[in-house]
Amino acid sequence: MKNKTSLLFVLGLVLVGLLVNSCKKDNQGTIETLLTAGKWQLASVVATVYLGDATLSTTTLNTTCDTTQIFSFNTDNSCTYSNFDCIPQTSSGRWSLSADKLTLSADMTCRDTTAVGTSKPFVAARIINLGQYSMVLDTGNIQTYDVTKPRTIVRYGFVHQKTTIK
């Protein structure tokens, strides 16, 4: 009889645990909430050239830049990037996520040091990592590619500036 009581008690605890964990949670931890819960400061930029899956070269960019670069996402789907490519500026645009929430699209145009003078660096950015403390985005030729031609992927690493996630 004692074993049956203990067994019923354990089963009751398991049942309560299942019920509590199955309740609908708020938006804490969703991709949208993580993006909009503060500002993201650029920590690193690395350009990697690939041929197929083989790495041809890796270059760390912005090594002499002492200007803080900030990427901000707002709940109305607007976004800003301050000081892109170490050029004093604030670029604005709109952001969205793909249906599978693995690709970020930000349509802002930023001045840069290319021959053209401007680019849309985050028009198609694959989300590699996104958490409360860091965000890593890959840009460049991230879609289907020809394995016989070199392609460049630029990886942006951001750290989250301290803000409370509600």
Image: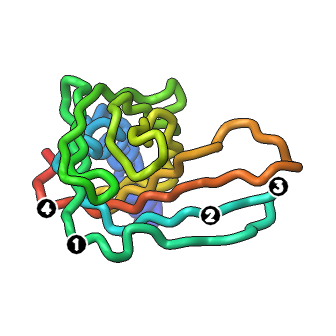
Q: Secondary structure at mark 1?
A: loop
- Residue at which label 1 appears: 66
Q: In front: 80, or 127?
A: 80
- Residue at which label 2 appears: 48
For residue 19, above or below residue 83: above
Q: Name which residue lies at 30% across and 43% down.
A: 20
Q: Name which residue lies at 68% across and 61% down.
A: 49
For residue 82, above or below residue 155: above
Residue type highlighted by circle 4: Lys
- Residue at which label 4 appears: 162
- Residue at which label 3 appears: 52
**Mark closest to the chain's N terminus, 1 or 4:** 1
Relative to 154, 29 lies left or right: left
**Mark 1 nearby-residue class (10 Å; few <14, some 14–19, many ≥20):** few
For residue 44, above or below residue 71: below
Residue type highlighted by circle 1: Asp
| Eye-nearest disc, 2 or 4 | 2
* Residue 159 location, quadrant: bottom left
**Mark closest to the chain's N terminus, 3 or 1:** 3
Position of residue 93 measured from the top left corner of the image (x, y, whole percent): 27, 28
For residue 23, above or below residue 46: above
Q: Is residue 92 visible?
A: yes
| Eye-nearest disc, 1 or 2 | 1
**Mark closest to the chain's N terminus, 1 or 2:** 2
Q: Secondary structure at mark 2?
A: strand
Position of residue 139 measured from the top left corner of the image (x, y, whole percent): 53, 47
Q: In front: 22, or 11?
A: 22
Q: Secondary structure at mark 3?
A: loop
**Mark closest to the chain's N terminus, 3 or 4:** 3
The Cα–Cα distance between marks 1 and 2, rounded to whole angstroms, is 22 Å
The Cα–Cα distance between marks 3 and 4, rounded to whole angstroms, is 39 Å
